[in-house]
């Protein structure tokens, strides 16, 4: 029978109460005294409103450096990670499970692109799989980026994998249910996997070997904790840029991860560099034109002129990376045909009808990301929906994301969307229906 959104799902030995999850997002919580409270405020609403799984966004396994954006959270301190038990306890009280996503930015770290951070941390280098590709070296020569890479030796790759294992162990001890490897979005793991970045001659010339080693490190320390990873296909890269991972390559990686003991995979299409292929949709003109962020953009990109150039580049990319509903679904279906572990789909999924179409054909579980910025308790509406046309309020305008370059939190900044969410909240649309009662009807 075709699985339903409300049906439970097993990932490894963990049973999730349904097949809806909050995908990883930037929480901008950092590691300060309010970090855990910030994470609770961001993640608890998804659990309280019915999500089966809540994914904490990318956390960095080794510092200093390695953050791809301001105010990311490090999980390289066991004392800090132990305090995250306050977060996991809250999520569990609502009957949901929680995953932590482990990452290192590598060549995409702030020490590459954020001018203010680079100025304040002149001695930081980027961890690199290989020497930066020619295209990125040209960008460095033009002053658009700044590279001072440290290419990892074979022994250092083993130590980096051990960092993933140590952070996973501390997280499991703090109550996390799932370890999620950030294998895409141009972070260091993707850089191992991608022929655009990886030109090594040792055993890690096969980039999947790094993920296999990470799995071994996690299993040795954590036992049978459910383990999953994003897996990229670099099919969204502009024509002529390569070499890159094809969809067939991504399918093969997923097959190998299943053999390596991963319990689920999240196939995603992406580029070889950070661009709007990750967040397809409209040009975020409101965010770029907001004066409250102007100084932050100038600090991040190296001056007002440079920030205007980045603004222009964003506009051009938005013309190329237009919004596509459920843009990873075809890749997910190809993977699902070849593996026997759950395939999770995310990226542009916006209606209950599309969710129902994807389950059992393209994937076993469905995740949403940016829509949670506008509707923190979105799961209640989707799980209670009586109409396949029930849709998220998110307009894919991307005004929530650009200010994160300044360290601002990811929140919806679209007045019409916020007004609609406020009305739904007043009408009780975000309250989970008690067992045995009829679903909450959508307001007209």
Image (cartoon, rainbow, N blue to C red):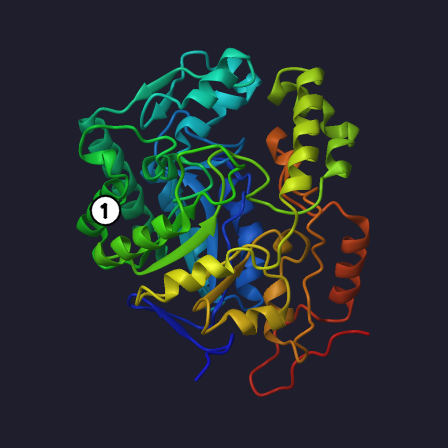
Instruction: Determine the residue positioned at 63% across, 57% down.
Output: 376
Work out whether residue 59 or residue 107 is closer to the camera in this orientation and state it: 107
Work out whether residue 400 or residue 272 is closer to the camera in this orientation and state it: 272
The quarter of the picture where residue 421 lies is: bottom right
Give above or below for 354 relative to 300. Answer: below
Position of residue 283 in the picture relative to residue 367 (left or right): right
- Name the spot of residue 8 as percent of width and height, x first: 42, 75
In the picture of the structure, the residue carrying the numbered disc 1 is 212
Name the quadrant of the C terminus: bottom right
Q: Residues within 10 Å of mark 1 (few under 14, many from 20)?
A: some
The quarter of the picture where residue 393 lies is: bottom right
Instruction: Determine the residue positioned at 34% across, 31% down.
Output: 62
Residue farthest toward the front in the current orientation of the protein: 240
The quarter of the picture where residue 60 lies is: top left
- Name the spot of residue 317 as percent of width and height, x first: 64, 36
Position of residue 186 in the picture relative to residue 353 (left or right): left
**Residue 228 visible in this rendered orientation of the protein:** yes
Name the quadrant of the N terminus: bottom left
Position of residue 343 in the picture relative to residue 271 (left or right): left
- Name the spot of residue 88 as percent of width and height, x first: 43, 56
- Name the spot of residue 190 as percent of width and height, x first: 38, 39
Mark 1 lies on a secondary structure that is helix
Residue farthest toward the bottom in the current orientation of the protein: 436
Work out whether residue 411 or residue 289 is closer to the camera in this orientation and state it: 289
User: How many marks overall?
Assistant: 1
Work out whether residue 319 or residue 119 is closer to the camera in this orientation and state it: 319
Instruction: Determine the residue positioned at 78% across, 31% down.
Output: 289
Position of residue 424 in the picture relative to residue 411 (left or right): right
Instruction: Determine the residue positioned at 72% across, 53% down.
Output: 395
**Residue 146 visible in this rendered orientation of the protein:** no
Give above or below for 131 relative to 44. Answer: above
Give above or below for 24 relative to 320. Answer: below
């Amino acid at each position: 029978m075709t699985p339903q959104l409300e049906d439970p799902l097993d990932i490894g030995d963990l049973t999730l109460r349904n097949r809806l999850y909050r995908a990883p997002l930037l929480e901008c919580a950092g590691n300060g005294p309010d970090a855990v409270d910030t994470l609770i405020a961001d993640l608890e609403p998804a659990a309280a409103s019915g999500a089966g799984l809540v994914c904490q966004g990318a956390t960095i396994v080794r510092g200093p450096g390695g953050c791809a954006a301001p105010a990311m959270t490090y999980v390289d301190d066991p004392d800090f990670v132990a305090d995250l038990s306050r977060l996991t306890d809250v999520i569990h009280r609502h009957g949901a499970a929680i995953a932590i996503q482990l990452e290192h930015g590598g060549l995409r770290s702030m020490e590459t692109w954020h001018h203010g951070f680079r100025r304040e941390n002149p001695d930081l280098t980027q961890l690199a799989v290989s020497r930066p590709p020619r295209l990125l070296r040209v960008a460095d020569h033009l002053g658009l980026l700044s590279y001072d890479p440290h290419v990892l030796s074979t022994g250092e790759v083993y130590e980096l994998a051990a960092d993933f294992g140590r952070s996973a162990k501390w997280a499991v001890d703090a109550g996390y249910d799932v370890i999620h490897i950030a294998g895409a979005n141009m972070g260091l793991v993707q850089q191992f996997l991608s022929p655009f970045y990886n030109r090594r001659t040792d055993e890690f010339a096969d980039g999947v070997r790094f993920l296999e080693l990470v799995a071994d490190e996690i299993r040795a320390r954590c036992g049978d904790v459910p383990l999953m990873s994003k897996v990229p296909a670099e099919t969204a890269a502009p024509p002529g840029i390569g070499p890159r991972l094809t969809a067939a390559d991504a399918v093969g990686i997923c097959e190998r991860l299943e053999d390596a003991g991963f319990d689920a995979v999240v196939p995603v299409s992406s580029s070889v560099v950070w661009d709007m292929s990750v967040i397809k949709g409209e040009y975020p003109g409101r965010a770029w034109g907001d004066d409250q962020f102007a100084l932050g953009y100038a600090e991040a990109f190296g001056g007002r002129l440079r920030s205007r150039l980045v603004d222009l580049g964003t506009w051009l990319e938005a013309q190329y990376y237009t919004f596509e509903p459920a843009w990873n679904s075809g890749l997910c279906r190809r993977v699902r045909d070849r593996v026997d572990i759950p395939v999770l789909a995310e990226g542009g999924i916006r209606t209950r009808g599309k969710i129902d179409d994807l389950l059992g054909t393209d994937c076993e579980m469905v995740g949403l990301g940016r829509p949670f910025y506008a509707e923190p308790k979105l799961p209640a509406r989707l799980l209670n929906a009586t109409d396949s046309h029930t849709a998220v309020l998110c307009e894919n305008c991307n005004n929530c994301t650009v200010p994160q370059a300044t360290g601002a939190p990811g929140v919806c900044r679209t007045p019409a969307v916020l007004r609609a969410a406020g009305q739904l909240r007043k009408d009780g649309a975000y309250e989970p229906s008690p067992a045995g009662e009829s679903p909450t009807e959508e307001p007209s």
